Image (spheres, grey):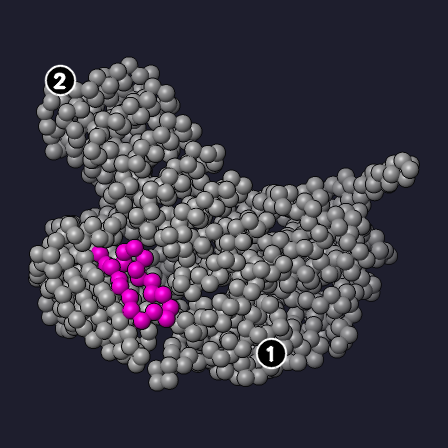
Amino acid sequence: MAQPLVKKDDDRDDEAEYSPFLGIEKGAVLQEARVFNDPQLDARRCSQVITKLLYLLNQGETFTKIEATEVFFSVTKLFQSRDIGLRRMVYLMIKELSPSADEVIIVTSSLMKDMNSRTDMYRANAIRVLCRITDGTLLTQIERYLKQAIVDKNPVVASAALVSGIHLLQTNPEIVKRWSNEVQEAVQSRAALVQFHALALLHQIRQNDRLAVSKLVTSLTKGTVRSPLAQCLLIRYTSQVIRESGVNTQTGDRPFYDYLEGCLRHKAEMVIFEAARAITVLSGVTTRELTPAITVLQLFLSSSKPVLRFAAVRTLNKVAMTHPMAVTNCNIDMESLISDQNRSIATLAITTLLKTGNESSVDRLMKQITNFMSDIADEFKIVVVDAIRSLCLKFPLKYRSLMNFLSNILREEGGFEYKKAIVDSIVILIRDIPDAKESGLLHLCEFIEDCEFTYLSTQILHFLGNEGPKTSDPSKYIRYIYNRVILENATVRASAVSTLAKFGAMIDSLKPRIFILLRRCLFDNDDEVRDRATLYLNTLGGDGSVVETDKDVKEFLFGSLDIPLTNMETSLKNYIQNPSEEPFDINSVPKEVKSQPLVEKKAPGKKPTGLGAPPTGPTSTADTYERILSSIPEFTSFGKLFKSSAPVELTEAETEYAVNVVKHIFDRHVVFQYNCTNTIPEQLLENVFVIVDASEAEEFSEVGSKPLKSLPYDTPGQTFVAFEKPEGVPAVGKFSNMLRFTVKEVDTSTGEAEDDGVEDEYQLEDFEVVAADYMVKVGVSNFRNAWESMGPDFERIDEYGLGPRESLAEAVSTVINLLGMQPCEGTEVVPSNSRSHSCLLSGLYIGNMKVLVRLSFGIDASKEVAMKLAVRSEDENVSDTIHDIVASG
Amino acid sequence: MLLAVLIANSEGNILVERFNGVPAEERLHWRSFLVKLGADNLKGVKNEELLVASHKSVFIVYTVLGDVSIFVVGKDEYDELALAEAIFVITSALKDVCGKPPTERLFLDKYGKICLCLDEIVWKGLLENTDKERIKRLVRLKPPTEF
């Protein structure tokens, strides 16, 4: 019995030894390639050599320019052979070598000959090769043949030409666009794949022509689409048309919805999913529209195929972000996916459940997740941590169990990115949920006692220095901080010294003890640590007496460096390169923030490695805006920035110039920041500014502007216009805008612009300053407590009829958007079919006035909505203003 | 875009690696990422059973066929379902060329044919042919039967 087994093993060894590519070596294969030059071609041998070359290339091996040229020239000789198998290999080899423009000429005549060959397959392949290696000039020569090929009877030839068209559209759009009649004809083809490729190409050619796309969709949704792949494309294009056309306001029907709904019953799963996804992303989708899509997705949750389960849970996960209530029906199926072998599916299920769960289910979920966390990879854990952070912000009362969960996983094994995600989350929770501060800080302190990541330790120490002194018992943190001075590396020690100094500066009673610790640091063996200790001892007044710290010193310790670090780096490098007697002057560093390139190069699959977060957590856009505005001298007198709006688009997508505006609100001023992007490579715009017509905004008067010197292609820049308005008044109005600039032609080959330019202007859309712009969304952890402690002194209550509405949910979200306040405790979500709803809102009104709002809604059978609005605030005028906003909205 | 098709042997050595629109400096990263993914999850998986993973906006569908593991990576319109379709075409073509789920040896023996099949299936990141019978004819420069 043993013998056959041994024999089998022997066989295996033999097999491995006989690998046809064993010991393959590039130099030897290149030598072998000389057989291509033989006068008597051995087709079989040539095919074998090409296979070896392909093997090398597929292993990631590269040929030098000379090697590639040599092989390419030899391969072209193989066109002499009539062997069909070899010819097919030659086509592939030429594509793989992708010869340079000056070499292509050698092979074009052979390929042109094949392109007109009677053998269809020669034609198809020659088209593919030519299109791969061709440039614009050659393309015009062969355009005629390609147009014929698109409508060729042989589907392989037609597909070859169409797919070539899709690739060529990127490099030679003007030529490919001329083929639209032929492509249109191919869309009607009876061959399934030809139709698929033609549809893709036709849409790409016409994607900017809304009417044409709409017509295409209308005709095809009524006609026949032959393959599931084409059907998926059609659904995607339909979804685009729906997005651009909106709901029919008279009947309330959505165009093409019936088509999408019909696709949910298609026999191909791919089509069903595409339709379900299209329905879930419809803007303002109603529960009635959503239900059939959710139902089919729910069925797929228990499919035996991982791909289908994954697709279903991924889609539902997205739906849960916008319509959590619609997904709750799937929760039971979703819970069973937590134990799915495929970790991607399990993670998506968990994060979906975290989004759809209600306050009462949090504890049960956390229990399930704890078991789950131990056996998934860091990248999945990060997703879960992010979801838990959002959950905690949604249900602040649950912070205790969620914070405990975070601190537990912080103690377990994990890589840097994972630990950083946890620390960032705890930092954010501490900031947003005041009650969570003390316990959160202690968790962080315990973490740095045994933290292997220098970056995280320094980040936490910095945060501790800012927040620790403001707690009820700051002295308890000192031990953790000073331990760092004893136990850690120099970077962390230096950081700990700074943190100690901050405690000393803020808490006078701790000062003498802090001085003792700082003096010990004077004997550290690292220069930086000693320097910092000396500096702080001197700035804080090192005699150890209990005196109040100077305001300037506090500013020095806690103030941020208001210079962009990249500018600082550049200035310092310049200073070092040009040695001078003068000391470096920090005031010489420009404060203007350099604009970022439009498209950041994305590395697919790569984990984010950049440590984007500054020491106190992720940079908020507000911080960035504040920095940009404070760097402009004209605006520095406006005081503290109260609020910056989200960008409002002032141009349509895909126009020559893309412009959006951000509204910055100050006490007595507003500043409009126009973010401009030039999307034309052949143009350089100079002296760019916006002419604002404020005739429909009477209370505003223009006080200044800052033009943009230069706006090169693809590099966004900003221009600003500032207005004065009455203090404390929520002035509203409409603004019309015209972009003015000098345009200069750019030679794209050299990148140089011409000296002379032409003045031009470009009409932008109007935008409005509305009441919600004067409100900042600030949540409270416990609305009831906040409401009670605010007291009824300035309470104003009134009732409003909102008229007939689409649904209760729509009415609630309209009022929330009108007021621009933060919904609390998840009350923005209206359960489906409910007849009444209460919503709690909180915010900070201009002048830093806290405002709390209680909304009670009711809807009757005729969809008439009534609302009771109760406002409490710190000022009666503010309470009245809230009512005014609602009354006039 | 179909970003990559990668075929490896059971030890994680690369047999075929075709990238589309992935910068050269990121390919090595992809290679090791996929091989690790396979090593972690493909043990004991049945032939042609599809596994799926995603990272950010990129999807990966992968499977085993005989001695080789096959990975396809895509983004945007090439989501997990389109990739499942693509990998189905690839596995059927492979079985067709090799006559059965291939051993590594058999795979290498048929290497040239396999490259031609892949060339017919994916062209610079777009799915071109999906029918194995047609592909079988096309690699021999024969027109499709239905024509």
Vertical placement of A713 versus A485: above or below? Answer: below
Judge by depth and name the residue closer to the eye, A820 or B86: A820
Q: Earlier in the sequence, mark 2 or mark 1?
A: 1
Tell me the residue at 43%/74% (across/down): A288
Q: Residues within 10 Å of mark 1 (few under 14, many from 20)?
A: many
Label 1 residue SS: loop
- Left or right? Give the position of B15 relative to A646: right
- Left or right? Give the position of A843 relative to A169: left
Residue A313 in percent (x, y) is at 51, 58
Residue A57 in percent (x, y) is at 68, 49
Residue A225 badge: 1
Q: Is residue A36 visible?
A: no
Q: Residues within 10 Å of mark 2 (few under 14, many from 20)?
A: few
Judge by depth and name the residue closer to the eye, A314 or A723: A314
Vertical placement of B44 versus A750: above or below? Answer: above
Vertical placement of A849 versus A732: above or below? Answer: above
The amino acid type found where label 2 is placed reads: Asp
First to last magenta residue range: A823-842
- Disc 2 marks which residue? A543
Which picture quadrant has residue A156? Answer: bottom right
Question: Which quarter of the rendering shows the C terminus of chain A?
Answer: bottom left
The amino acid type found where label 1 is placed reads: Val
Residue A169 in percent (x, y) is at 53, 68
* Chain ID, mark 2: A
Tell me the residue at 10%/62% (across/down): A729
Tell me the residue at 13%/56% (across/down): A873
